[in-house]
Image (tube, rainbow, N blue to C red):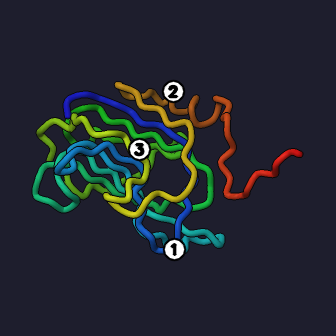
């Protein structure tokens, strides 16, 4: 709770319509740690679908009376589009200390729960789409970085726009050279 951190990565969300997906989590028993997940997708225009992103930091199951910070993105995040996400946490134990950036722009969030007083440290493994916590993540995830501090706006822009990307996230299969 009292240590700042940042998580940054590229993703291209796939999955079936209406399916909730667990994206990334570092959780121990009783859900101490953090989790990023998507709710079921719905049409968002331009023949695309989109989902809300949920962020949970703390101890307790979603909706549990135990302490946690829970946020939901106000806009739906489009599927099938490569995007860069940054989660910045200032260690304050308050929802106001969690900031999300999508493609280097602040992402507006709704606070669902703001009650964190204990530690989120745990010995759990960092997992991508663990099916025991929800439906496994379907899509691409690349260039995952975790920092023991908050990223500055300049660093977020560097990761989102200016730094070369080693892999292109695409739903299309790559052609093999013969």
Residue at mark 1 = 17
Image quadrant holding the N terminus, namely: top left
Kindly report the distance in space between the C-alpha atoms of the residues bearing marks 3 and 1. Answer: 24 Å
Q: Which residue is mark 2?
A: 155
> Circle 2: is it few (<14), some (14-19), or many (20+) Cα within 10 Å?
few
Give SS at disc 3. strand
Q: Is residue 48 above or below residue 151?
A: below
Q: Residue furthest right?
A: 178
Q: Position of residue 164 (x, y in %)?
A: 68, 31
Residue 32 spot, x, y in % from top left: 20, 44
Quarter where residue 19 is shown: bottom left
Relative to 173, is 9 above or below? above
- Quick check: 104 above or below 42? above
> Which image quadrant: the C terminus?
top right
Q: Residue 98 appears at what percent x and percent y?
A: 32, 41
Q: Earlier in the sequence, mark 2 or mark 1?
A: 1
Task: Identify the mark at residue 4; answer none if there is no mark.
Answer: none
Q: Residues within 10 Å of mark 1 (few under 14, many from 20)?
A: some
Give the CA separation, mark 3 to mark 2: 14 Å
Look at 46% across and 74% down and name the residue there.
18
In depth, the one of 115 and 13 nearer the eye is: 13
Q: Give the crowd class for mark 3: few <14, some 14-19, many >=20 residues within 10 Å.
A: many
Disc ID at residue 100: 3
Closer to the chain start, of discs 3 and 1, is: 1
Residue at point 52%, 71% (across, down): 16
Quarter residue 87 falls in? top left
**Residue shown at 39%/57% (left/top)?**
22
**Numbered disc 1: secondary structure:** loop
């Amino acid at each position: 709770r009292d240590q700042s951190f940042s998580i940054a990565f590229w993703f291209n969300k796939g999955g079936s319509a209406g399916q909730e997906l667990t994206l990334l989590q570092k959780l121990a028993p009783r859900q101490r740690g953090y989790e990023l997940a998507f709710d079921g997708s719905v049409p968002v225009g331009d023949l695309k679908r989109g989902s809300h992103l949920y962020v949970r930091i703390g101890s307790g199951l979603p909706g549990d009376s135990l302490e946690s910070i829970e946020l939901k993105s106000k806009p739906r995040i489009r599927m099938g589009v490569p995007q860069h996400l940054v989660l910045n946490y200032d260690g304050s134990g308050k929802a106001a200390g969690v900031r999300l950036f999508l493609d280097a722009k602040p992402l507006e969030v709704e606070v669902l729960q703001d009650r964190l007083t204990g530690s989120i440290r745990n010995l759990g493994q960092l997992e991508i789409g663990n099916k025991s916590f929800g439906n496994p993540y379907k899509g691409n995830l690349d260039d995952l970085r975790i920092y023991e501090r908050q990223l500055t706006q300049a660093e977020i822009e560097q990761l989102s726009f200016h730094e070369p990307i080693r892999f292109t996230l695409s739903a299309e299969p790559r052609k093999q050279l013969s």
